[in-house]
Amino acid sequence: MTNMHKQGEAQETWYRDPNEQTEADGSHVDRDPLTSRPRISALVLCLVAGLACLGLTALVWWAAVWTVPGQTYDDMALTNFRGFLDQTPLLEAYLGLFAMPYVTVVICLVLGLVALAVVLVRRRWWLLGQIAVYALVVYGAARILKRFLPRPVLIHSQASTANSAPSGHTILALAVVLALLCVVPRVWRAPVALVGFAFDLSVGCSLVQGGWHRPSDVVMGMLIPVGLCLIALAVTRGTGMDVPGTRMSSASIQIVATLMLVAGFLGMLYACYVIWQVSPGLEIGARWTAYGVHCSAVIMMASLLSLTLGLVLALRQVTASPLTRMGLVGRPPAPPQND
C-alpha cells in the first residue's frame, strides 16, 4: 500500500500545472521540459514562418507599387470590381453589410472582448502578455506603414493615387481572429479558424467592392498580422500552453488545418497562373484582362487567407500541446505494484 500511495502522489505531481510545481515536489529533477515550453524546433518554425510572411509582405508591396503591371492590376481590379459582383446579386448584398459604417469594427470589438474574457477565465497570464504585445505591435505597424509607405505614380490611374496600403480593416479583422484562435481551448481552435476565414474574406472583398482598398492592400493586411502572430507564438512558455495532462492530438485541427493548407496552396498556384495569363494585357491596359484580374484577385485573397489561417492553426496546436512520441507529456505513470 505504501508503494501505491507514493506512485499516486508522483503521478499527481507529474500532471500538475507547471506553475504550481515546487522544489518540494522533487519535480525540478525529472520534469519533462515540454511541460513548460514547446519544442525548440516548433519555436524556430514559428519564427521562420513569421519572418517569411513579413518578407512576402514586402515583396507584394514592391510588385504592386513599384511596377507598371502591378499598379495596372490593382487599378483594374479596384475600378471594375463592383461590376464583376453584379453577376451575383446575393453575394453583392452580403458584402454590402460589411461596407456599412462601423459594422466590421463592432464585430472585431466583440471578438476582441471574447478573446480577453477567455484568456482571463483560463488564467493564461503569459498568453495574455503575448496577445497584449501582439495587439500593440500590429496596431503600430498598421499606423506607421500606411502613413509612411510611398506610392509613385507610374500609370494614369482611375482610382486615387494616394497610398492605401496596408488595409487597416483587414489587419484589425484578422488580428482579432488570430488572437481568439490562440487563446481558446483545443476543441474550439478549428471552428474559430473556419468562422474567421469566412469573416475575414468577407471583410477583404467588401473593401475592394467599396473602392476603399486595392487587392494588394488586402493581401498585405493578411500577411502582416499572420507574420507577427507567428513570431509571438515563437515565445510561447508556461501558461501560454495547454495544461499538462490535458494535452492530446486533435482530429478536427488535423483535418481543418490540412484542408486549409492544401486548398490555399493550390488556390494560390491557380491565381498566379491566371495573373501570368493576363500579364501581357496588363502592360497595355487591355480590357480583356478585366475578368481574369477580378477572378484572380478573389482567388488570391481567399487562398492566401486559407493558407495562413491553416498555418497558424497547426502551429498553435504544436506550440500549445507538445507531445512525446507516446502521446504523453513526460514519463508515463508507472503501473501499481503490490507489496
Image (tube, helix red, strand yellow):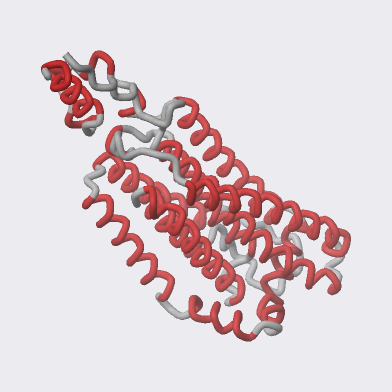
Measured as percent of width and height from the top left, residue 40 is found at 45, 25
Residue extending furthest front? Answer: 338
Residue at image point 50% right, 43% down: 314
Whether residue 307 can be seen here: yes
| Left or right of 225 on screen, residue 29 | left
Total of numbered circles in the picture?
0
Quarter-wise, where is residue 105 in the image?
A: bottom left
Q: Identify whether 150 is placed above or below 19.
A: below
| Left or right of 73 on screen, residue 100 | left
Measured as percent of width and height from the top left, residue 247 is found at 36, 38
Quarter-wise, where is residue 233 in the image?
A: top left
Q: Identify whether 204 is placed above or below 116.
A: below
- Which of the two residues, 148 or 314, is positioned nearer the viewer here? 314
Q: Identify whether 226 is placed above or below 32.
A: below
Whether residue 168 can be seen here: no
- Which of the two residues, 296 or 68, is positioned nearer the viewer here? 296
Measured as percent of width and height from the top left, residue 206 is found at 56, 73
Measured as percent of width and height from the top left, residue 41 is found at 49, 27
- Quadrant where the C terminus sits is top left
| Left or right of 134 on screen, residue 124 | left
Q: Identify whether 325 is placed above or below 284.
A: above
Residue at image point 73% right, 63% down: 296
- Which of the two residues, 55 or 238, is positioned nearer the viewer here? 238
- Which of the two residues, 146 or 114, is positioned nearer the viewer here? 114
Residue at image point 59% right, 60% down: 217
Residue at image point 68% right, 55% down: 65
- Quadrant where the N terminus sits is top left
Quarter-wise, where is residue 88 in the image?
A: bottom right
